[in-house]
Image (cartoon, rainbow, N blue to C red):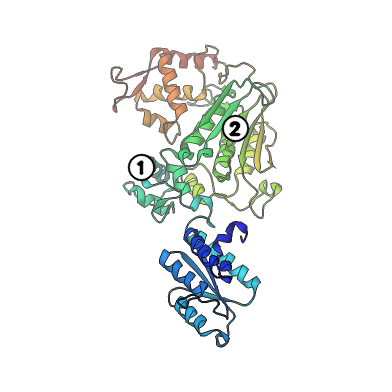
Amino acid sequence: MITDYHAIYYAHELSRVGGTGVDRLGRALFDACVDLNPHQDEYGWEDGEGLSPTHREFRQATGLGKTRLIYVKGTDDSRRHPKMKALIGEASSELIRRRVNSPEELLSAVYASLVKLLEEQELIRFTPFDASFCRNATLEDLDLEGISRFLLLARRGRSFPLPEDTPPEDVLSHLNLLDKGRPTHAAVLLFGKKPQRFLITSEVRCAHFHGFEVEKPIPSYQVYKGTLFELIQQAKDFVLSKVDLWTGDRSQGVQVPTAYEIPQEVVSEAIVNAICHRDYTSNASVQVMLFKDRLEIWNPGSMPPGLTLEKLKQPHHSVPANPLIAEPLYLTKNIERMGTGIRDMIQRCRQAGLPEPIIHLDAGEWVTTIRRKPGVFLTSPQSGAQSGAQSGAQSGAQSIEVLKILAVENEISANILAEKLGLQSKTGAFKRTLQDLLKQQQIEYTLPDKPSSRLQKYRLTAKGNAILKQLNQENP
């Protein structure tokens, strides 16, 4: 802490000489942020007004409104020069002083005082990153509708105690997402209108490679931005739209059974873990990479204290890296709080006949690797194809789900449709799915002349209904 760079703070060094030194002291004090003013036994050289450089420095710093740190050498004031005693009394009447007995104590005291000063001025922090305020962000930068949607989901999912008409600011306060009325980093990441404006590396990068290594050209590459809720959904949609989906028949019930090549719960858990527990102070972003033989998810972070890679596979207590981010994700059922996530991933992979996920740390990055089934992955650039549906009309699991819902509901709004799909908002992937289905004439507007109307709804077309019937016939 005490280096040549900080010498300007220690202007008392200049007080050892008079004349030119006093002038230098005044100039240094004008530019300084802090005045360090140690008081010893001797009063020192006096100018024409009978003031020592130390005394004049103190008064100038007071007049300039500088932060003053006062340190008194020793505890025996009887040996001090009378004017030094008067200066100590003058300083003591205005601010707190500390006594030191050695250079080592002075060094320690100065360090502690400067650290406290920087913390008070909010230039350094000791609270978790997600709990500290987001510089330059205001409540106007938060999406009030997003907070209201969260409140509905939290009440349905976890019996959140606040009523539905709770003002958004009260919701944030209840979740400890405000710091002196200012949005915390967690608030901006969860509910910001444009979170990446403040935290640019909070984006998620997704890439799909046809081979086994990272190499160009990249067939599909997306950089997703938005709230953490949106990032989770967008990244999940990216992966699930590019892995195989098996579709069964209704021989065992009304619902048609489906199964992804990689269980969607495993994909979801891995992505949520990366986004929730990443180190948001890092310049790295979460990366989701789908290869021909595996899914890899990278996120910056470190091992929680007291845990090891082996302990993560066993029953253990939950240690979220970002507790204020984890709580809203828990309330919306994105995560649990029992430390069971990795064990659930292992169990579901085994049930699906997949190898156990591999998790390791690599130069400050968590890397989660989930193997795909040999001989099952797609080799064609056309991803998301459905098993048994060779008509090519469907390109993604979400499209089929939309058609199924419309077959039952007849007419439905985009908001309700998204909710039935289990989405927390109308994500970009969801909107693209609707547009693709509209272009393919598998669904249609109920108000075709007013596509942007707030009363707009969607319904299944004859073509969309025929595709659903064809799927059922090909999977009797």
Label 1 sits on residue: 144
Q: Position of residue 293 (x, y in %)?
A: 68, 26
Can I make out residue 262 in this image? no
Image location (x, y in percent) of residue 353: 68, 31
Q: Residue placed at 54% from the left, 46% from the top? A: 336
Q: Which residue type carries mark 2? A: Val
Residue 85 visible somewhere in the drawing: yes
- Residue 295 figure quarter: top right
Between marks 2 and 1, how big is the CA–CA gap?
29 Å
Secondary structure of the residue carrying tag 1 is helix
Residue on which the image places disc 2 = 288
The crowding category of the residue bearing disc 1, from other C-alpha atoms within 10 Å (few below 14, some 14 to 19, many at least 20), is some
Give the secondary structure at mark 2.
strand
Position in image of residue 46 (x %, y %): 51, 77
Determine whether label 2 and label 1 are within 8 Å by CB: no
Res. 7 image quadrant:
bottom right
> What count of labels does the image hold?
2
